[in-house]
Amino acid sequence: MDDFTLIVGLGNPGEKYHGTRHNVGFAVIDRLVTDYNADGPKRFGKSLTGRARIGNEKVILMKPMTYMNLSGEAVREGVDFYKIDHTSRLIVISDDINLPAGRLRIRSKGSAGGHNGLKNIISHLGDDAFIRVRVGVGAKPSQEADLADYVLGRPAGEDKELLEEAVERAARAVACIVEEGAERAMNEFNG
């Protein structure tokens, strides 16, 4: 098999989730599809995928269609089929309520941080040694607010602008990881 990098954006399938905070990973994949003229989308197992080139590197852009909490099933399928070394050639993009809206955090391994999609991927891969790009969506507005309602809500006003800018920066960060490595991307985009 060719040396592909598998880039996975986490989200929930279906129009009712489009544009929600929880689907920021899907939004980054959409941006990469446009920026790098990916083919597809094609149905692959439990995902939609497209192939592209970022610089000289071949990538597979993936949106799991499993719903967030079962993302690991789709990621495992992709890793196994394309014979991906998940410690160096898997990049997962997710939302993060522990980061201010619009902030990025890139790590080459680490805990799920309470994120059920990441938790499921770690469970299916057997370790946490994969690159992740976390996009801050901000904390829920109050202790009483329901977390599910918050992450499944659509941002408005300044929050929406911050997230749109973050999606664009996250796409650039992913390209930087692919072309120059995670360390370089961390230095440039973590903040």
Image: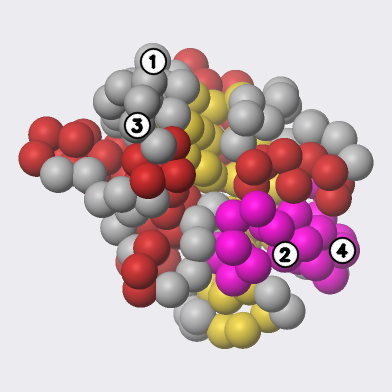
Q: Which mark is residue 74?
A: 2
Q: Which mark is residue 191?
A: 1
Identified by mark 1, the residue type is Gly
The disc, 1 or 3, on the residue closer to the chain's N-terminal end is 3
Q: Mark 1, residues whose alpha carbon is within 10 Å: few (<14), some, or many (≥20)?
A: few
Q: For the magenta stretch, what is the residue range?
A: 61-86
Residue 3 relative to residue 148: left or right: right
Q: Is residue 53 above or below residue 160?
A: below
Q: Residue at x 50, y 80 (%)?
A: 41
- Whether residue 63 is in magenta: the answer is yes
The disc, 3 or 4, on the residue closer to the chain's N-terminal end is 4
Residue 123 image offset from top left, x and y in percent: 84, 44
Q: Quadrant of residue 138?
A: top left
Identified by mark 4, the residue type is Asp
Q: Answer yes or no: do the residues labelled 1 and 2 have beta carbons within 8 Å?
A: no
Identified by mark 3, the residue type is Ala
Q: Quadrant of residue 189?
A: top left
